[in-house]
Amino acid sequence: MNRLVQKRPEAGSTASGKVARPRGRPRADAQGVANDPARTMEDILEVATREFSEKGLAGARIDDIAEAMRTSKRMIYYYFGSKEGLYVAVLEQAYRGIRDAEDALHLEDLSPEDALRRLVGFTVDYQIAHPEFTRLVMTENIHRGEYLAQSASIQRLNVPAIAGLRKVYERGVKTGLFRRGLDAVDLHMSISALAVFNVANRHTFSLIFKRDLESPNALIARRDNIVEMVVRFVRK
């Protein structure tokens, strides 16, 4: 499976969707992290992603993140303003990662069916390689999208994803390959649902049905089945 590198979020992004304005310069700790703000923010976000994805917003603790970073809570608050501001920055980075990876697929260079197959396969692979993304989205759904709604950048990030899928679909309709009447958002939802299920339910399914759903063969077979299901659904 391809493991794709996620980019950093905008510096100082907070739950309000605005850039946090630091109040006073923090004192560098023993590691001197304050001397490299971009690296410091990247490291904080990496640790915070693990914390929020494993424990949720309520269970995550800034103290634990600071301890893992070997830095101070003050340093974290300096860059992100609050626990909620850090959580929103983590969400923004997570969504930016998958959308940037989608942009690199160059679907416009492929035939409609090949483009659809690549997009669906990529989505399955990405979710498996980044289970923290699924867990973060699940956490945000528990909060009914409260914090996602406060981030204008996340909402902007998802517009190109739908536009790209719509272009692939419309090219397929134009060539007579895909059937008419499908909605791009609904199709995106179906692809996401099939891909997310692999991560969200793999432990319970493995236990109930006594199958190792994380074995390489099982992952490849499931990926191929999902790709084929979507393509057959869209074909004319």
Image (cartoon, rainbow, N blue to C red):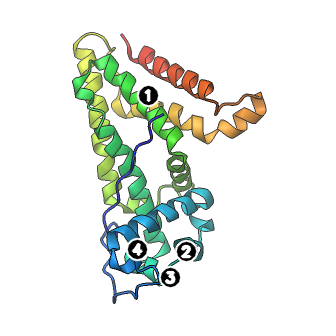
**Real-space Cα separation, disc 4 to disc 2, in angstroms:** 11 Å
The amino acid sitting under disc 3 is: Ser
**Real-space Cα separation, disc 3 to disc 2, in angstroms:** 9 Å
**Real-space Cα separation, disc 1 to disc 2, in angstroms:** 36 Å
N-terminal label among 4 and 1: 4
Q: Mark 2 = which residue?
A: 62
Residue at 58%, 35% (x, y): give it: 198
User: Residue 199, relative to residue 97: is it above or below?
Assistant: above
Instruction: Point out which mark residue 72 bears.
Output: 3
Q: Secondary structure at mark 2?
A: helix
Q: Mark 4 = which residue?
A: 80
Q: Nearer the observer, disc 3 or disc 1?
A: 3
Q: Is residue 68 visible?
A: yes
Q: Secondary structure at mark 1?
A: helix
Horizontal and vertical percent position of residue 38: 33, 69
Asked if the residue at tag 2 contacts the one at tag 1, i.e. Cβ–Cβ closer than 8 Å, the answer is: no
10 Å neighbourhood of mark 4: few (<14), some, or many (≥20)? many
**Real-space Cα separation, disc 4 to disc 1, in angstroms:** 35 Å
The image quadrant of residue 189 is: top left
N-terminal label among 3 and 1: 3
Asked if the residue at tag 4 contacts the one at tag 3, i.e. Cβ–Cβ closer than 8 Å, the answer is: no
The image quadrant of residue 19 is: bottom left
Asked if the residue at tag 1 contacts the one at tag 3, i.e. Cβ–Cβ closer than 8 Å, the answer is: no
Horizontal and vertical percent position of residue 165: 31, 31
- Residue 162 appears left or right of 130: left
Closest to the observer, 101 or 135 = 101
